[in-house]
Amino acid sequence: MRQEVQSPQPPLLEVSRVIKHYNGAKPALNDVSFTVRKGEFISVIGPSGAGKSTLLRCINRMIEVTSGEVHFDGARVSQLKHAELKKLRSRIGMIFQHYNLVDRLTVIENALHGRLGAKSTLAGAIGNYSREEKSHALEVLAMLGLGEHVYQRCDRLSGGQKQRVGIARALVQNPAMILCDEPIASLDPNASRIIMDHLKKFSKEMGITLIVNLHQVNVAVNYSDRILGVNSGRIVFDGTPDELTTERISEIYGAQSDELIEGLQKQYAT
Amino acid sequence: MPPDIFRRRRRDSLVFFSALALLTAGAVVITRYDVIKGFTSVFRAVAWGASNFYPDTHALTKLPDIARKLWGTVLMSVAATTVAAVFATLLALLGSRTTRTHPAFSVLARGVASVFRNIPLVAWAMILMLAFSQSLLTGYLALFFGSLGFLTRAFIETMDEAGIQAVEALRATGAGYPAIVLQAVLPSSLPQMISWMLYMIDTNIRDATLVGLLTGTGIGFSFDLYYKSFHFHEASLVVIMIVVTVVAIEAISNCIRRIIIR
């Protein structure tokens, strides 16, 4: 599904030579560079602790990089002032493994939280949403199959439903890009498939760029245009799903790879 | 051979209860407390109470007067608690891990809460009396400072429990601090916070009696006056009315709790 480069369109996202040091001796990200075009569906795979979550959070500056630069749609992310950063974040949706909803609030209220970044301080503080914003949120929820649960509290929902609320919150931002941090790691296979199908649809039909952290290699292979393999803070693979051979997988995962590959082969056999 | 967990459990409880018994016996010996006399005097106290400490018809004529004093005390306790709750919310926002803007503020807020909470109410009343002498304001401020310390601590814990996850999500949408607090943190924490506030109101109505004794105001002062002038019937009426009020307020707050915490 990867398009050949036809026009010299500038990349939507450019991560160049990013290094992130926490307090430990080893950097969490070590000289990471890649570019992302508009509408691409990219999966990031790699063993736990490889730096996938850190990488995602450096893009919208939820984590400050130690050195290097992230360019998003022409803006130098590390140089942005407070108000500009909020504006940038409002154009980038984010989806989390644990959904990160306000459980005591209803589905529609959580979805509308996606509008807060685009509001004035006062309107955001009192949660004053316009009629258009509300009807947009309702449309998005209906599209995600949550039409019947709009006024239900989120703690009454199943995991798959909660994640769809999380997606709705990202979508009402009208984002250019959505960052997904292990979106299906807490879900059963059926709910996972529904979530991944929705994400795929956003990239294909709405032109939204997606960067998805995954730890299921087979899901990455089935859904992505392009896969990044991360190990110990470095990008060790950058290519299409076809190029992800078993040798490449073992390079990405090191010692953990054997059972992964076995699982993959089993899946292809059935 | 595996360690015998049952035998170890038995040994542990034997050691614990022996130590407790020893401690009790030691305390009794050192303070020369006569246990038998202590228990028998309970019966004498009850007998005395039954013959003297009950409201008679004359005491009932004082009922409106006592009720007015009690009502004033209840209102003061409520006001001290609610105002303290507002300030405690602000301090808790600085102190909680989920909402703090800087770790230094967090240490400061927790420190203030700890100091205020660990100064006993009576000490507060004594200290404030130096500044405001025996007045309603002294009692009000004593309750206010005690509540502020306790509620700040309780609110910090409530906000910590609400978790950083939704805060992270809202930060990622570009939402500002006021929106994050009002749209995510407070909706998660408010029911629990109100529950703590109701508990504090209960406690403060009880404690206001004691503070009133010291500061010469409210229902505590009425009790003191009646008791020290040997008007035991009136004093007993005061006690009964305090108990009835506290029980009623507790019933009301339990009712409110059931509605808001679901």
Image (cartoon, rainbow, N blue to C red):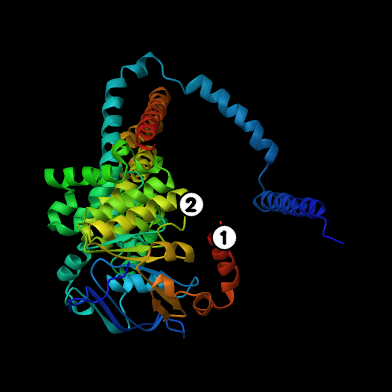
Kindly state the secondary structure of the residue where label 2 is placed: helix
Could you give the CA–CA distance between mark 2 and mark 1, rounded to whole angstroms? Answer: 18 Å
> Share a chain, discs 2 and 1?
yes
Q: Which mark is residue A269?
A: 1
Task: Residue at 36% x, 46% y: name it.
Answer: A103
Residue matched to label 2 = A189
Asked if residue A183 lies left or right of residue A266, the reply is left
Label 1 crowd bin: few (<14), some (14–19), many (20+), radius 10 Å: few
Question: In the image, what residue type sits under mark 1?
Answer: Ala
Q: Going 59% across and 67% down the picture, which residue do you hit?
A: A262
The answer to whether residue B175 is visible is yes
Q: What residue occupies the far right of the structure in this picture?
A: B1
Rate crowding at label 2 as few (under 14), some (14 to 19) or many (20 or more) other CA atoms within 10 Å: few
Nearer to the camera, B121 or A26: A26
| First of labels 2, 1 by sequence position | 2
Residue shown at 56%/65% (left/top)? Answer: A265
What chain does badge 1 belong to? Answer: A
Residue A63 picture location, percent across and down:
32, 73
- Residue A157 x/y as whole percent: 40, 42
